[in-house]
Image (cartoon, helix red, strand yellow):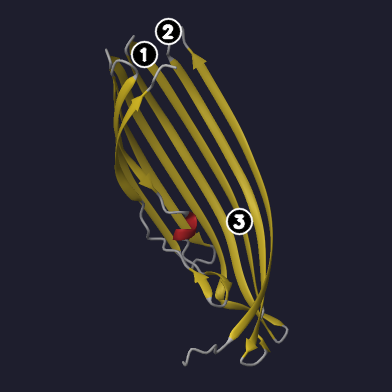
Amino acid sequence: KGGGIDSSLNRKGESWEHRNYNQVEFNYTRNFDKAGKKFTVDMQYDFWNSNKDWNLGTERILPTSILLPMVKTGATGATKDLIIQTDFTLPIDSNSSLAIGLKMDHRRVSSHFIAAQEQGGVWDIIDQIDNRLLYKELIGSAYIEFSGKSGSFNYQAGLRNELTQIGIEESTGQYASTKKYNRLFPSLSLNYNFSKGATLQGSYSKRINRPSLNLIYPFNELTDLTTRFMGNPDLNPSYADVFEVGFLQNWAS
């Protein structure tokens, strides 16, 4: 009112974080006598943990000087991700080949977030923000892909099926949610090579964009008494039909 400053705050925050990240990879490749025929198995296992503490002190300096309650938060988390994929490529003739494959992606994330404020030397939990969550995600997929060429024309057509299962649990039983969905993802790529290094390209693919973990966690997180965040576990993935057209021209040096 009147354009004047009604209050002024001075804040000081300190944060500490420790992370530990590990990764294990395995690959097996079997080549056959027939040129281009190949079988592969790939495995990747990621496991990490983190521990983060945040302390925030706030002082109101206008209109009167007063120390506001100190806020501290703690966040610990651990993730285990296992990906196993197998692919088999089979040449049909000198101009075409068939590829099939399976993939499993299993993710398990546990987290604990707690927020407290100091009142008269005693720390009290803020609005029951003391949450322990377990997130589980399993994605199974299978694909088939056919590619070939005829003269100056190259093509590749594929179809992938994904089955996803998600579960979110709170350790005290306050919240539990499960979700399952299945979707087909077709793809098509066409190339035509003109003379003198010119290529016309066109492609189509259906893609999925899954919401990040922090967007679906259902409980509060905060960095101070006025800034909070709550995710929505009912969020669904978004899908896109992507068309691309390109023209490439290479000139001899």
Callout 1 crowding tier (Cα within 10 Å): few <14, some 14–19, many ≥20: some
Residue 66 at what x, y percent from top left?
67, 89
Callout 2 crowding tier (Cα within 10 Å): few <14, some 14–19, many ≥20: few
Residue 189 seen anywhere in this rendered image of the structure: no
**126 or 202: nearer the eye?**
202
Q: Amino acid at mark 2?
A: Lys
Q: Say above or below: 143 vs 235.
A: above
Residue at coordinates 65% horizontally, 42% vertically from top-left? Answer: 22
Q: Secondary structure at mark 2?
A: loop
Q: Earlier in the sequence, mark 1 or mark 2?
A: 2
For label 3, the residue is: 77
Q: In the rendered view of the protein, which quadrant contains the C terminus? A: top left
Residue at coordinates 57% horizontally, 55% vertically from top-left? Answer: 110
Q: Earlier in the sequence, mark 3 or mark 1?
A: 3
The quarter of the picture where residue 206 lies is top left
CB of mark 1 within 8 Å of CB of mark 2?
A: yes
Residue 91 disc label: 1
For label 2, the residue is: 34
Q: Earlier in the sequence, mark 3 or mark 2?
A: 2
Residue 14 disc label: none
Residue at coordinates 32% horizontally, 47% vertically from top-left? Answer: 239
Q: State the CA–CA distance, disc 1 to disc 2.
A: 8 Å
For marks 3 and 1, give the one nearer the viewer: 1
Q: Amino acid at mark 3?
A: Gly
Residue 230 at what x, y percent from top left?
47, 67
Residue at coordinates 61% horizontally, 69% vertically from top-left? Answer: 114
Callout 3 crowding tier (Cα within 10 Å): few <14, some 14–19, many ≥20: some
Residue 28 at what x, y percent from top left?
54, 22
Q: State the CA–CA distance, disc 3 to disc 1.
A: 46 Å
Q: Secondary structure at mark 1?
A: strand
